Image: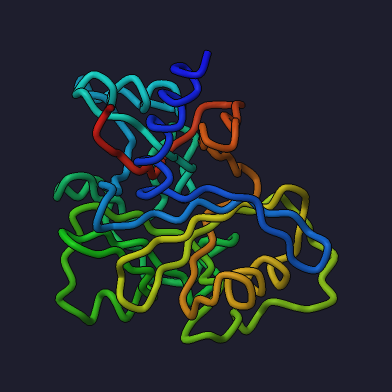
Amino acid sequence: MIRWVLFALLWAMPVAAQVDCRDETHLGQGFAVCSVDLAQADLRTFLRDSEGKILGSFSRVAQRVEATGDTLAFAMNAGMFHADRSPVGLYVEDGAEAMRVIPNAGPGNFGMLPNGLLCIGEDRADVLETRAFMASETRCRFATQSGPMLLVEGDLHPRFLPDSTSRYVRNGVGTSADGQTAHFAISNSPVTFHEFAEFFRDVLGLKTALYFDGSVSRLYAPSLNRHDRGLPLGPMVGAVIPAN
């Protein structure tokens, strides 16, 4: 029994160092957070398998990762998608652009400008406002676009209202100023946009953050015993680490 306990502890240590998943609270609301160290974990987007079929679930992503001898330490739905599960806006996977960037205002949360994208490069990850990204020469190895931005330079999106009555289980991502840590969060109960953005700013201490979804918000975090299930997903993001 002692040997088994020691083995389990040793197995968990590298995951904890590379992907830190934990529960947080803010103003009486609960949130699950997974912080990914870009220096130690490989952060990627996932959409289709090797045959071009939509993966659609965390289980299929985990199987795909395990087939290469690695481990999926964390995953989350990452952006809005059409009925066929294809991405609404920019989507890049391993350098290949599957969907172009959409810069214009439009219906729904995605088109609530400013919107943005998660850009994962060779050695960093950044949440970037869409038009700023387009004006730059930034290259993304992996990317997914969504909207609205939750935080821009530390300011909440101008359309978020403190007294809003629109509440959903929401998820999103924020990145550190040095691009070395990506923080993914999902609310454990319905929250407003304003409350969700405040969590990224006041608890996680971030200045840039992006909303992923509220109609579909799910988390895969084995260290928290989380494997949220439901209807098939579109774009997903996950952290890959070497198997022990």
Instruction: Identify whether 174 is placed above or below 86.
Output: below
Which color scheme did the rendering employ for the protein?
rainbow
- Give the image location of residue 57, x and y in percent: 46, 26
- Give the image location of residue 150, x and y in percent: 56, 72
- Give the image location of residue 122, x and y in percent: 15, 59
Residue that extends furthest to the top in the rendered view of this protein: 1
Looking at the image, residue 120 sits to the left or right of residue 29; the answer is left
Looking at the image, residue 128 sits to the left or right of residue 152; the answer is left
Tell me the residue at 45%/59% (across/down).
Answer: 146
Q: Quadrant of the C terminus?
A: top left
Tell me the residue at 82%/71% (across/down).
Answer: 164
Tell me the residue at 60%/81% (across/down).
Answer: 156
Q: Quadrant of residue 70?
A: top left
Q: Quadrant of residue 13?
A: top left
Q: Quadrant of residue 66?
A: top left
- Give the image location of residue 109, x and y in percent: 58, 62
Q: Nearer the viewer, residue 227 or 166?
A: 227
Q: Nearer the viewer, residue 199 or 12?
A: 12
Q: Nearer the viewer, residue 161 or 174?
A: 174
Instruction: Identify whether 130 is placed above or below 73.
Output: below
Count of marks overlaid on the render: 0
Residue that extends furthest to the front in the rendered view of this protein: 2
Tell me the residue at 39%/21% (across/down).
Answer: 60
